[in-house]
Amino acid sequence: MEESGIADKNTPYWWEEAPVRPLPRQPLAKKLDVAIIGAGYAGLSAGLVLARERRSVAAFDAMNSGEGASTRNGGITSGSIRPDYATITRRFGEEKAIAIEAEGKVAREFLYDFIKTEGLECDFQLVGQFKGVIGYDDYEKTARSAEVLAKRLGIDAYAVPYSEQRNYIGTDFYRGGMVRMDIGGLHPAKFHAELLRVALASGLTVHAGTRVTSVERDGSEFRVVTEAGTVQARQVLVCTDGYTDGAVPFLRRRLVPVRSRIIVTEELAPEVMAQLMPRRMMMIEGRQLGFYYRPTPDGKRILLGGRDSSRVGDPAAPKLFLRRGLINLFPELENVRLSHTWFGNVAMHRDMLPRIFEKDGVVYATGFCGSGVVWAPWIGTRAAHKLLGHGEQARTAFDFRPPAFIPLYRGNPWFMPAIIEGYRMQDRIALYRARR
Ligand SMILES: Cc1cc2nc3c(=O)[nH]c(=O)nc-3n(C[C@H](O)[C@H](O)[C@H](O)COP(=O)(O)OP(=O)(O)OC[C@H]3O[C@@H](n4cnc5c(N)ncnc54)[C@H](O)[C@@H]3O)c2cc1C
């Protein structure tokens, strides 16, 4: 009776303790030093730096602040880079590839330090991450990459053979895996609420529920047209990621919004949680469309996410797909009820590297490809320093040219269901081969 397992609520579990709320209406300034479009992690992180440097700065968000991906995500501080090291080296050269890998470490440390020094109450726990692999060949490769992470970047990373897997996760599905201790979990909506708190206290104005409809060049400045009126801004920063709309057509033709969906179980018995997630680690898989999962911060439920190939409405199929994935990993959860399910958009693009870039004087901080808990605060902060002209603090290996144009694409990702189905097929073949 799978139908009965579909969740009670179609809103993020995270909103129970940290709901997204409308903000008090603010008068619109006629002139600004900087207008930021988007008030998720990236926009607020940039706004915080700019406000502390005494710039007149406002962030505009079409929805409630945080109602995009920043309060809907899994809260895993992965800081992942999707292309592997070999691919980045081939495209950009070895020096850039090393700089990108190294910056992931710095960006994670920046986030952890930021949470600590600002006193952000967001249930952050540096518990480590286990990555499960599906075949013994993958295990050998993963073991080698753990060695590289440890040797080259000094990250506490190690391989876990199949025989020891149950010390980390209560399943036999994987053929071993890898642990890295520089990754943890936070409560994403609390993190956003706390970031908003410090940004507002520092002087950032946030106009929530105020869509920007266009940005027009006006001499050396910009006319930013919003639903609440027009603002003259010296500089503009775009932080719209997976929610990019027609206000910035240049970006819309380059970023593809892809749904990521999450399910959360009801509270499980402490002994079940101890058996399934003995170390309370964050979990990912080495498959094309792998699941990501974790215990909730109170350690009482399991949250599991993955790609959702639906594009409109809220159909049952993707929820059932995740539920089956959960039970495939943990057959003991066959009769579990789900309390919540929801989805949000992640922004994918051609080379899958997060970035800062400038086009016609507008600066963009975006393209986080589903790993923005670490990257959005980091890239948002670097972008603010770039706008301030702070050479050294703005330095990042992610200051690139814009993402490549996607032919025949103007913002309607009609091709995504087919692409996701293609990846699923590759995963099925890989699993079949690995288990022959
Ligand atoms: C289900 C899910 C699970 C995820 N899990 C993880 C995870 O575990 N770890 C991880 O690192 N990352 C994860 N991510 C990705 C992460 O949440 C995002 O990368 C990150 O939140 C992006 O932050 P942002 O500030 O760039 O964008 P967002 O938080 O998406 O904010 C963009 C904002 O721009 C606004 N906007 C768009 N157009 C306009 C306009 N014209 N005018 C005004 N405002 C506009 C939107 O309203 C939106 O609020 C997940 C994402 C999803 C959806």
Image: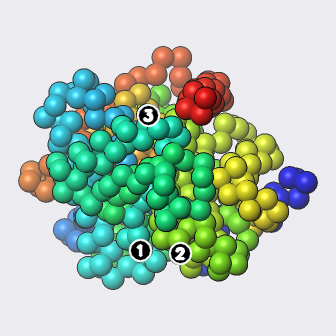
Q: Which residue is mark 1?
A: 125
Which residue is disc 2 drawn over? 297
Q: Amino acid at mark 3?
A: Asp
Residue 245 in the image: state x and y as whole percent. 53, 40
Q: Earlier in the sequence, mark 1 or mark 2?
A: 1
Q: Are marks 1 and 2 in contact (CB under 8 Å)?
A: yes
Residue nearest the viewer, comparing 81 with 24: 81
- Measured as percent of width and height from the top left, residue 72 is found at 57, 59
Three-letter amino acid code at disc 1? Gln
> Is residue 185 visible in this depiction of the protein?
yes
* Quadrant occupied by the C terminus: top right
Q: Are marks 3 and 2 in contact (CB under 8 Å)?
A: no
In space, the residues marked 1 and 3 are separated at their CA atoms by: 32 Å
Residue at position x 67%, y 64% in the image = 264
For image coordinates 65% across by 80% down, the residue present is 270
Quadrant in the rendering for residue 330: bottom right
Identify which residue, 344 or 200, lies in the foreground: 344
